[in-house]
Image (cartoon, helix red, strand yellow):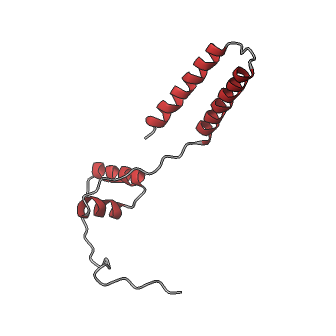
Amino acid sequence: MARPAIDKSDKRSVRFTFRMNEREEKYLIKLMAYSNLSGAEIIREIVFKNRLLQPKIPVLDQKTYGELKRIGVNINQIAKKLNSGDKVNNIDATLKNLSAQLDLIIQHILHDR
């Protein structure tokens, strides 16, 4: 099956070249990583569509995901014991520890951009 024909008015046949210094190039590379677009797409979005770039969706690494899963399991175990009427030893310390771990993960996610 052949590729559909592009309308002549939509075909990008004009090339425009410009120069950047190293600082500008680094910034463009940073924008490319931030938005997951090519340099040409970024320039077209900003110049012709006057749009701000949207960040790509961050991916949690395996360690962070595993830690969040462990925290969820711990909370479920605590809830199960409390709901069954069993006494939970050191619940305050455990909850403080889980809260501190969650705070660290949230800080890592927020400041990892």
Residue closer to the observer: 96 or 46: 96
Q: Is residue 49 left or right of residue 109?
A: left
Q: Residue 27 location in percent, x, y?
A: 32, 49
Q: How many marks?
A: 0
The image quadrant that residue 74 belongs to is: top right
Residue closer to the observer: 83 or 43: 83
Quadrant of image for the C terminus:
top left
Q: Is residue 54 left or right of residue 1?
A: left
The residue sitting at 47% across, 30% down in the picture is 107
Residue 23 position (above or below residue 94): below
Q: Residue 108 location in percent, x, y?
A: 49, 33
The image quadrant that residue 81 belongs to is: top right
Residue closer to the observer: 77 or 33: 77
The residue sitting at 30% across, 84% down in the picture is 8
Residue 44 position (above or below residue 96): below
The residue sitting at 62% across, 33% down in the picture is 67
The residue sitting at 37% across, 82% down in the picture is 6
Residue 99 position (above or below residue 9): above
Q: Is residue 67 left or right of residue 86?
A: left
Q: Is residue 38 visible?
A: yes
Residue 30 position (above or below residue 3): above
Q: Is residue 19 visible?
A: no
Quadrant of image for the N terminus:
bottom right
